Image (cartoon, grey):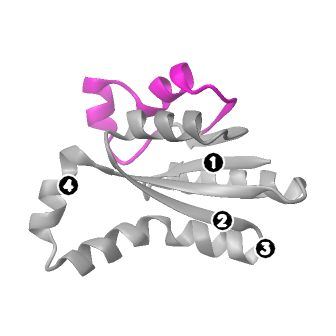
């Protein structure tokens, strides 16, 4: 079984990731793809605020490190997928092209204000992903 979880460093994403890993524990030979999308709208600001490309990479890795560590503790095999672009579009593209069996996503990410203006990432993913989606509050 191929399970994917989208993470952005938020507490909701961490809860979703823990749920995905616990789901993987129940299925023998389940694999978990940890998806992190570097939002193209924030990339320029992140780059300007970082001291170097290495520090930017390290800052991004911190957003999913807890998830990788938790999966290691549970002895679940993971793959980290780092994408660039609009989070909803990239998550949808990845899960639809990768034959993912189950996607787990948090109900709210890091930027609730932007969600009100533009629309929820989780809502768009729910509508357009071809696999079952579990939304974790």
Q: Spatial distance from mark 2 to mark 4, Cα to Cα? A: 25 Å
Disc 4 element: helix
Q: Is residue 89 above or below residue 109?
A: above
Disc 3 element: loop
Judge the density around disc 4: few (<14), some (14-19), many (≥20) Cα neighbours within 10 Å.
Answer: some
Judge the density around disc 1: few (<14), some (14-19), many (≥20) Cα neighbours within 10 Å.
Answer: many
The residue wearing badge 4 is 43
Q: Is residue 86 left or right of residue 70?
A: left
Tell me, for residue 45, which label it has, or none: none
Of marks 1 and 4, which one's residue comes earlier in the chain? Answer: 1
Q: Spatial distance from mark 2 to mark 1, Cα to Cα? A: 9 Å
The quarter of the image holding the C terminus is: top right
Tell me, for residue 75, which label it has, or none: 3
The residue wearing badge 1 is 4
Of marks 3 and 1, which one's residue comes earlier in the chain? Answer: 1
Boundaries of the magenta span: 108-137
Q: Is residue 50 left or right of residue 64?
A: left
The residue wearing badge 2 is 78
Identify which residue is drawn at 79% across, 55% down: 24
Q: Spatial distance from mark 3 to mark 1, Cα to Cα? A: 16 Å
Q: Is residue 129 above or below residue 136?
A: above
Q: Is residue 109 magenta?
A: yes
Q: Spatial distance from mark 4 to mark 3, Cα to Cα? A: 33 Å
Of marks 2 and 1, which one's residue comes earlier in the chain? Answer: 1
Of marks 4 and 3, which one's residue comes earlier in the chain? Answer: 4
Identify which residue is drawn at 9% across, 65% down: 48
Q: Spatial distance from mark 1 to mark 4, Cα to Cα? A: 23 Å
Which image quarter: residue 22?
bottom right
């Amino acid at each position: 079984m191929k399970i994917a979880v989208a993470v952005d460093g938020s507490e909701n994403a961490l809860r979703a990731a823990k749920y995905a890993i616990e789901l993987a524990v129940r299925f023998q030979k389940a694999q978990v793809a940890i998806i992190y999308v570097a939002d193209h709208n924030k990339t320029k600001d992140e780059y300007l605020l970082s001291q170097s490309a290495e520090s930017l990479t390290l800052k991004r890795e911190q957003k999913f490190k807890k998830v990788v560590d938790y999966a290691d503790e549970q002895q679940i095999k993971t793959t980290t997928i780092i994408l660039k672009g609009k989070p909803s579009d990239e998550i949808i593209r990845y899960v639809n092209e990768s034959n993912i069996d189950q996607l787990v996503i948090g109900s709210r990410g890091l930027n609730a204000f932007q969600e009100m203006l533009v629309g929820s990432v989780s809502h768009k993913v729910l509508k357009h992903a071809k696999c079952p989606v579990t939304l974790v509050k």
